[in-house]
Amino acid sequence: MYKRIVLKLSGETLAPIGDEKGVYSPDRVNEAARMLIKVASTGAQLCVILGGGNIWRGRFTDEMDATVADNMGMLATILNALCCAEAVNRLGGKAKVFTAQEMTRFADLYTKERADAALNEGYIVFAAGGTGNPFFTTDTGAALRAAELKADVVFKGTGAEGIYDKDPNKYPDAKMYKDITYKEAIDKRLGVMDTSAFVLCMDRKVPAIRVFKMDDLNNIYLAATGADLGTVAHL
């Protein structure tokens, strides 16, 4: 059993399945919220990092300023956090949203101390707005929050079963690792997470990243309660 989990979910988790233009599916939002409540009911403290890909996928032209595009992406993650936290609270759980940028009309400004206190009080914490800076993805944001909050593990959801030596969607002979060190993942340039996320976890001694398929959201609960899913990257 893990005491404190940082969970990285894609924004597409909240979107209609198979609808590239859909932003939110009420059923998917509620399903995600119920699963987070279920995980929290085990006693695990849960910090959720949502991507923003259901709303914003980055620059639509090379001429667009990259900083502006990344700022828009960070705002998309905040919208997703507000959406999912509302569902958690509405369905009987306890959730708080913190943002890396000052926008106290909508949520509290993230600090390690505030997030740590909320986790200890039993809230599901949504750490939104990425790292607060452009050019860093939500993968790196998840690694950063895990290091700050001394999480036991980062859960990273993908469309594949785990970490492979090459893209399993392109190469039928791709082989999945069950266990790999951060250094090996960095040296092999495995693309399941940003290299900066692996480096941060290695340098700050985050114990593990578990990468597994999250098409079935119940896999989050299974992993939280000890199931040997996917791949574990570690020190």
Image (tube, helix red, strand yellow):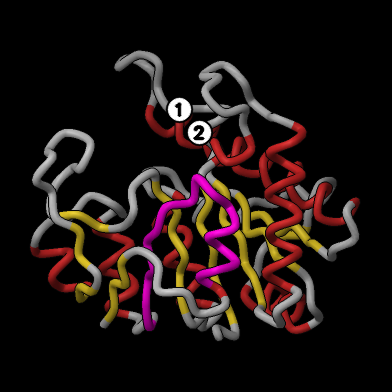
Asked whether residue 222 is drawn in magenta, I would say yes
From the viewer's side, name the closer residue of 14 and 175: 175
Residue drawn at (47%, 49%), measured in percent from left and top?
133
Q: Which residue is mark 2?
A: 53
Quadrant containing the N terminus is bottom right
**Residue 57 tag number:** 1
Quadrant containing the C terminus is bottom left
How crowded is the residue under tag 2: few (<14 C-alpha within 10 Å), some, or many (20+)?
A: some
Q: Quadrant of residue 40?
A: bottom right
Q: Position of residue 22 (x, y in %)?
A: 62, 20
Asked whether residue 61 is drawn in magenta, I would say no
Determine whether 27 is above or below 63 in the image. below
Q: Position of residue 45 (x, y in %)?
A: 66, 77
Q: Position of residue 47 (x, y in %)?
A: 62, 67
Q: Magenta segment range?
A: 207-223
Instruction: Say what secondary structure mark 1 lies in.
Output: loop
Q: Is residue 18 left or right of residue 33?
A: left
Q: Quadrant of residue 14?
A: top right
Q: Position of residue 124 (x, y in %)?
A: 73, 67
Residue drawn at (30%, 17%), measured in percent from left and top?
62
Q: Amino acid at mark 1?
A: Arg
Residue drawn at (72%, 41%), measured in percent from left and top?
29
Q: Amino acid at mark 2?
A: Gly
Determine whether 187 is above or below 58 in the image. below
Residue drawn at (74%, 81%), measured in percent from left and top?
117
Instruction: Say what secondary structure mark 2 lies in.
Output: loop
Q: CA distance from mark 2 to mark 1?
A: 5 Å
Q: Is residue 172 left or right of residue 201?
A: left
How many marks are shown on the rendered structure? 2
Label 2 close to label 1 by CB (< 8 Å): yes
